[in-house]
Image (tube, grey):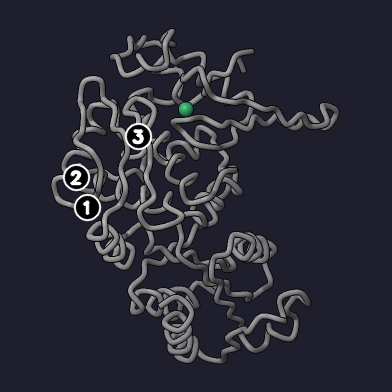
Amino acid sequence: MPPNSTCPICARFDASLTFDLRDPTTGDETLCHVGCPRCGNYRIAERDGEALVKHIPQTLDPDRADEPRHVDPGARAAAFPLDRLHLVSGYLRELTARGRDDTMVSAESATTMADAAPATVPERSERLLLTLAAMSESAGKRHNIHGPRDRSLAYCTSGGELMFLLHHLLQDGLLDGPPVRSDPPIFDWAAVSLKGWARVEQLRAGSTSFAQAFVAMTFDPDLEWIYTESIAPAVQKAGYQPLILSRQEHADRVDERIVLELNRSRFVVAEFAQHRPSVYFEAGYAVGRGLPVIWTCRVDDYERAHFDTRQYNHIVWRTADELRDRLYTRIKVVVG
Ligand SMILES: [Zn+2]
């Protein structure tokens, strides 16, 4: 990592970098904790950060970072695609706004983050409104917005693009604030309006980004029916999208992908058949994050349940139909 304060994702010079120096005898990677005004707070292995920074052409003035960058075709092939880094920046800023500031970035998780970015202009406009709402501890909270710094709030490539989206949210009455100035792209302040809050509630109820249910269970193919016959239908009937990571997908850097998907999920279904350690890890992580966890366990496995989780109210089930029906009811009660 360079000795200055350069953000490895967006190359701003005013980020704060602190290093978590692990015991070098174990060979663990050195972790860098980054606080960037544009990308928010995240963690990156020193080696990955260096690889990124090396390929980002740096501008001398962070406020001129909106100018088109010269991209060396050789560098593009060697590092994460530069034209997708703004999506990673947007994703991290959004997670930071929701209070998650230790997201781990690697080449693999950066790809997942960029893939998860909102694809269309209307979606990005909605995400901007949701993020401003997430950053508001109280109604009427005024946010100072600076285009080049805050373009990540809407996954934009320039401050001007952010001003365009803000202008239209203001025109539609979803934000309060003074008129937008495009040149320079600075918006004095913006607050989510009462009409905006109504829209936020609508979006929260139906938003795909809040509709994912993470399913933690054994990978044993002989028990896949628990997912296909019970858990998936119950989750879908309740209006959510189940996500289960297959054994193959997790083979590499298992923790990052799991943590990333857990962070994007509304709740977790943890099925304890065979008592896989990964299920305990995923459920424990979700509890620590304040996500609702619905615990299920087949009756013959229940007696062997780990002591620490017996305190939770498991759905102890005997048949696929019973699990499906009871899980659906539990989701509606616990999550809504
Ligand atoms: Zn940054």
What is the x, y in percent for residue 14?
A: 52, 20
The residue at the point 58 percent across, 48 percent down is 251
Q: Which mark is first along the chain, 2 or 3? A: 3
Residue 249 in view of the camera: no
- Give the CA separation, mark 2 to mark 1: 6 Å
The residue at the point 52 percent across, 57 percent down is 262
Q: Give SS at disc 3.
A: strand
Task: Name the residue carrying label 1.
Answer: 174
Q: Circle 3: is it few (<14), some (14-19), or many (20+) Cα within 10 Å?
A: many
Residue 167 versus residue 214 in the image, above or below: above
Amino acid carrying label 2: it is Leu
Residue 31 versus residue 281 in the image, above or below: above
- Give the CA separation, mark 3 to mark 1: 16 Å
What is the x, y in percent for residue 149?
A: 39, 27
Quadrant in which residue 315 is drawn? bottom right
- Give the CA separation, mark 3 to mark 2: 13 Å
The residue at the point 44 percent across, 31 percent down is 38
- Toward the right, the furthest residue is 25
